[in-house]
Image: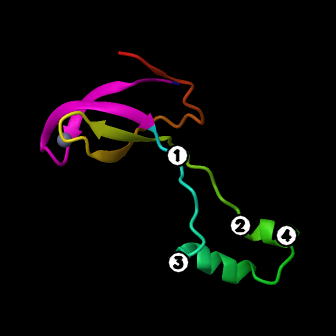
Amino acid sequence: MKMPDKIRTYCPHCRKHTEHKVKLYKKGRTRPTAQGQKRHDLKTHGYTSKIAGKVTVYKQAKTPTFVLTCSQCSKKHPKSFKSRTKKITELVKK
Ligand SMILES: [Zn+2]
């Protein structure tokens, strides 16, 4: 799927339509002290790596999520579109 790298859409901070930069959302580094990570560690505690792998079945998101950066207030907000493609092959320059 192709996606333009700049779109004009609504910004909830400016409360109007502005130009936005489009970037694909990627998960950041996990923190070992995060509450969810602690819960996960407690659940898998004591198991070998093989079984622990079975406990954690993460499903990939069906719709790709984008991070839109407003050109005026430079604030970021997420947006996912209805297309259910697995891969975004490229961001097309507009
Ligand atoms: Zn804005």
Classify 39 as above or below 63.
below
Amino acid under label 3? Gln
- Residue 57, position as x, y percentages in the image: 70, 62
Q: Would you call the spot at circle 1 few (<14 residues within 10 Å), some (14-19), or many (20 or more)?
A: few
Question: In terms of secondary structure, where does tag 3 sit?
Answer: helix
Q: Left or right: where does residue 74 sit relative to residue 28?
A: left
Sequence order check: which comes first, mark 1 or mark 3?
A: 1
Q: Give the range drawn in magenta.
A: 2-23
Local crowd size for mark 4, using a 10 Å CA cut-off: few (<14), some (14–19), many (≥20): few
- In this orientation, which residue lies closer to the viewer: 83 or 4? 4
Badge 4 element: helix
Q: Which residue is drawn at 47% across and 43% down?
A: 25
Q: Which residue, given by chain and number where applicable, does mark 1 sit on?
A: 26
Q: Quadrant of residue 36?
A: bottom right
| Separation of marks 1 and 3 at Cα, in angstroms | 20 Å
Residue for badge 3: 35
Q: In which quarter of the image is the C terminus?
A: top left
Q: Name the residue under label 4.
A: 49
Q: Mark 2 points at which residue?
A: 56
Secondary structure of residue under mark 1: loop
Q: Earlier in the sequence, mark 4 or mark 2?
A: 4
Q: In this view, does 1 lie to the left or right of 77?
A: right
Residue visible at 25% across and 41% down in the picture: 74
Indicate the amino acid at tag 2.
Thr
* Residue 63 placement, left or right of 41: left
Identify residue type, mark 1: Lys
**What residue appears at the point 60 percent right and 72 percent down from the top-left corner?**
32
Q: Residues at badges 1 and 4 in contact (C-beta under 8 Å)?
A: no
